Amino acid sequence: MYGGKFVPETLISSLSELETEFNSVVRDAEFQEELAKTLRDYGGRETPLYLAQRLSDHYKKGNGEGPVIYLKREDLNHTGSHKINNAVGQAMLAKRMGLRSVVAATGAGQHGVATAAACARLALECIVYMGTADMEKQPQNVMSMKLMGAQVRSVEGNFKDATSQAIREWIGNLETSYYLSGMVAGPHPCPSMVREFQSVIGKETRKQAIERWGGKPDVLVACVGSGSNALGLFHEFIRDEDVRLIGVEGAGLGLDSGKHSATLAMGEVGVYHGAMSYLLQSTEGQIVGAHSVAVGLEYPGVGPELSFLKDTRRAEFYNVTDEEALHACQRLCRLEGILPALEASHAVAFLEKLCPTLPNKAKVVVNCSGRGDKDLPTLFNHDSINGLLN
């Protein structure tokens, strides 16, 4: 029911060629070996599965026991987030296909920085579209992209507008250009590709859990914008029915305010950016802009696979507000000395509601999908957090 290729006829052959090449590299041992080596030596994998002892202690019950919380430290990757996993894989694929130019869109800038880095390494031209609103919030990432040689082109609006423009750019240069998506959304095979390149997160998590305590996690928690970091963690465990999968969306200023990015909670099924999935839309079927204090969650859609996981109830989806995410960010800083991105802070924030419901010694893995350096201006300018710093 979800996904598909709802695109102009001119794109079908390019998407089919991309699918063929992707299916080839999935089975190509030489490509996979080179990818693993690059992620290790360039990207910094494997990332630690970190026991957050003080955060775990924070949720101890009256009897002194409670769940045990681990952080999957994707924030320690090169360029500061999980985005490098996919950017490296797709840039290698673009090079293999003989394409010279890569075009991408970014919201919070993490995908843009990762794409710029991967393209610099492989001597590919890089063009990144970014919304003017996001550029104002994330000047550090804009500068990083430019330093790595990327052309950063502004688009009036935010991430959804930048994505539309990046796709237009790609359509106009199909013979020489590669569209490097960072989302598990968009026309097939883009969601499958991003999911596949991000699945290293869950594969490592299974291996590390077996090494640490001889079993699987009981609960996996990840924030959800379009869903790349969530599916990256979840995919390895989808068939493990005894592992709970929990995605956390941005409730923004509250679901009743209309200022949120909770697509799975409040959206309806529709078609956007070439695929069918849950979307934030009006009664007339027009796309409604998303809001979150975490720029990377401000997308009015979600990946088709997460839409399916919602309908089949294999995964659970909840949401937390801007305020809750901001305070979770500050809590992790104070308890563990880790500054998470505001996107990842949504997953951390949900522990407040989740942990009291869990049995003692339940193993919880939270995907710390990115670091929060980029969000310091937002944190320092927010009254409730700034008051704690003075």
Image: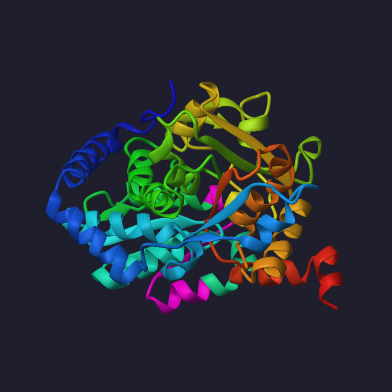
Is residue 347 positioned above or below 111 on the image?
Answer: above
Q: Residue at x 38, y 68 (%)?
A: 116
Q: Residue at x 37, y 68 (%)?
A: 44
Q: Is residue 281 visible?
A: no
Q: Quadrant of residue 15?
A: top left
Is residue 213 positioned above or below 75 on the image?
Answer: above
Is residue 306 positioned above or below 368 on the image?
Answer: above
Q: Residue furthest front?
A: 63
Q: Quadrant of the N terminus?
A: top left
Question: Is 40 displayed left or right of 79 in the figure?
Answer: left
Instruction: Assess whether residue 146 is covered by the magenta stretch.
Output: yes
Q: Position of residue 186 (x, y in %)?
A: 42, 39
Q: Quadrant of the C terminus?
A: bottom right
Q: Nearer the viewer, residue 281 or 89?
A: 89
Instruction: Assess whether residue 231 is covered by the magenta stretch.
Output: no
Q: Quadrant of residue 139?
A: bottom right
> Range of the magenta residues?
142-161
Q: Is residue 215 visible?
A: yes
* Color encoding of the figure: rainbow
Question: Is 27 displayed left or right of 364 in the figure?
Answer: left
Q: Nearer the viewer, residue 24 or 218?
A: 218
Q: Position of residue 269 (x, y in %)?
A: 55, 24
Q: Position of residue 360 (x, y in %)?
A: 65, 42
Q: Nearer the viewer, residue 350 or 377?
A: 350
* Number of numbered tags placed on the structure image: 0
Q: Position of residue 198 (x, y in %)?
A: 38, 50
Is residue 332 positioned above or below 317 on the image?
Answer: below
Q: Residue at x 36, y 54 (%)?
A: 86
Question: Is 357 displayed left or right of 37 in the figure?
Answer: right
Q: Nearer the viewer, residue 217 or 193?
A: 217
Q: Quadrant of residue 117?
A: bottom left
